[in-house]
Image (cartoon, rainbow, N blue to C red):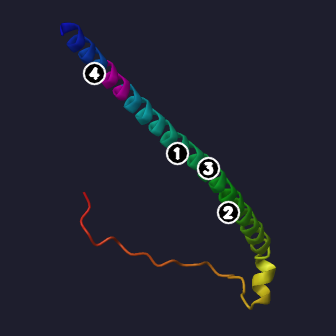
Amino acid sequence: MAKVIKKTIEHHKTETIFWILLALITVFLLAYLYLLKLAVFSAYEIKNNQKTLSAVNAERQKLERLYLDRITKFDTNYAKTLGFTEQKNKIDYITREISVAKR
């Protein structure tokens, strides 16, 4: 009788250990798959962001080139064609004293 009880207890312990190990393996496998999914999505997002960044940089370079082309057009000759004249006299600037207390 004692041998039967001992075998039953050992069988129960073995079965419990088996299910615990199976549960742990399942949890680790699910965690691995989740982390793998995160890594794949992160890599995809990085690739997508790099494409977007390339497009934005190309647009920025195009706009800078256009800006530099247009700004070189502004000189004294262009201002004269628009009706501006050069100031011959001394230019006086109006200044104002600061009316708040200083330390």
- Which of the two labelled residues, at mark 3 and mark 4, occupies the earlier sequence position? 4
Question: Is 103 left or right of 24, judged from the image as shown?
Answer: left
Three-letter residue code for mark 1: Leu
Query: Which residue is located at x 59 percent, y 45 percent?
Result: 40
Above or below for 41 versus 8: below
Which amino acid does the dot numbered 4 rest on? Answer: His
Element on which disc 3 rests: helix
State the residue at coordinates (72%, 82%). 86
Q: Residues within 10 Å of mark 3 (few under 14, many from 20)?
A: few
Q: Which residue is mark 3?
A: 46
Kindly report which numbered mark, 3 or 2, lies closer to the viewer in this rendering. Answer: 3
Q: Position of residue 6 (x, y in %)?
A: 23, 11
* C-alpha separation, residue under disc 1 versus residue under disc 2: 26 Å
Return the residue nearer the eye: 18 or 54. Answer: 18
**Considering the numbered disc 1 on the image, is that residue within a helix, a strand or a loop?**
helix
Q: Nearer the viewer, mark 3 or mark 4?
A: 4
Q: Quick one: which residue is furthest to the front in this view?
A: 1
Main SS of residues in magenta = helix
Tag 2 residue: 56
- Name the amino acid, label 3: Ile
Magenta range is 14-20
Q: Position of residue 21 (x, y in %)?
A: 38, 25
